[in-house]
Amino acid sequence: MSVAIKMSLPGVSVPKKGAPSEKVNIGVVLSVVFHAAVIGYLVYLVHPHALFAEPKKVMTVVELAPPPPPPPKPIQPPPRTPPPPSKQAAPPPPEQIVTQAPTPPVEAPPVPPPPPPAPVEAAPPQRIVGTSVPGAYYNSLQALIQKTVEYPARSQLNAEQGVCKVRVTFARDGSIEDEQLVKKAGFPALDGECREVFKRIGKFPAIPDNANPSATDFSIELPINFALG
């Protein structure tokens, strides 16, 4: 079966009907086109993207121009310092004519401060002297005197004997304050020992609190007997 296709292409001459060589050439062209279409269709079924490749995405880099630099700060001139005022020499003080020597001021003599007030001395407590002591206390004083007294050796050689009495004043704590010979034994050695014995004793025992509690001191007479046995 032969098909005659009449095509009108610009610049292509179509052979006339009845030429066998021209019919063969058209059939060959159609066969090639047909097979090419079939092959292309098969390729499309296997690799659909082989014939129609996606276009590659091209990254477009847009370079932005850098921001313009900030305008430079205006340069201000330094503040002007006013020139220091010129020092003018002060006019000299007017000369003073002294016609009379100045009189020095008379200073009043300093007033001495008033003397400090004299301290008020507390009045001493009233002294009350008792003239009697308990008998037991009196006997203890006699025993102390007999223990402390010394018979002068010269009086013993000369066989001097006698009794003297001494008034002794002492405080409540027993401190001896004074001794007075109120009766002499008659011999200087014995009279001297009557007074020295109390100086050696120095202090009696303290007075009991219940003995004349209103008295601050006591004054009693104590006899001393010098006798050769």
Image (cartoon, rainbow, N blue to C red):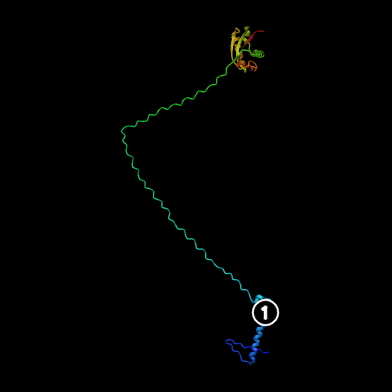
103 vs 155, nearest the viewer: 103
* Residue 1, position as x, y percentages in the image: 68, 89
Q: Which residue is mark 1?
A: 41
68 w.r.t. 152: above or below = below
* Residue 93, position as x, y percentages in the image: 33, 40
Q: What amino acid type is highlighted by mark number 1? A: Tyr
Residue 80 lies left or right of residue 152; in this view the side is: left
Q: How many marks?
A: 1
* Residue 204, position as x, y percentages in the image: 63, 16
207 w.r.t. 37: above or below = above
Q: Residue at x 66, y 76 (%)?
A: 48
Q: Residue at x 65, y 85 (%)?
A: 30
86 vs 184, nearest the viewer: 86
Residue lying at the far bottom in this picture: please name it.
18
Q: Quadrant of residue 104?
A: top left
Within-10-Å neighbours for mark 1: few <14, some 14–19, many 20+: some
211 w.r.t. 186: above or below = below
* Residue 8, position as x, y percentages in the image: 59, 87
Q: Residue at x 66, y 81 (%)?
A: 37
33 w.r.t. 187: above or below = below
161 vs 115, nearest the viewer: 115
Q: Dot 1: what SS?
A: helix
78 vs 49, nearest the viewer: 49
Residue 202 seen in the figure: no
Q: Quadrant of the C terminus?
A: top right
Residue 26 seen in the figure: yes
Residue 79 lies left or right of residue 35; in this view the side is: left
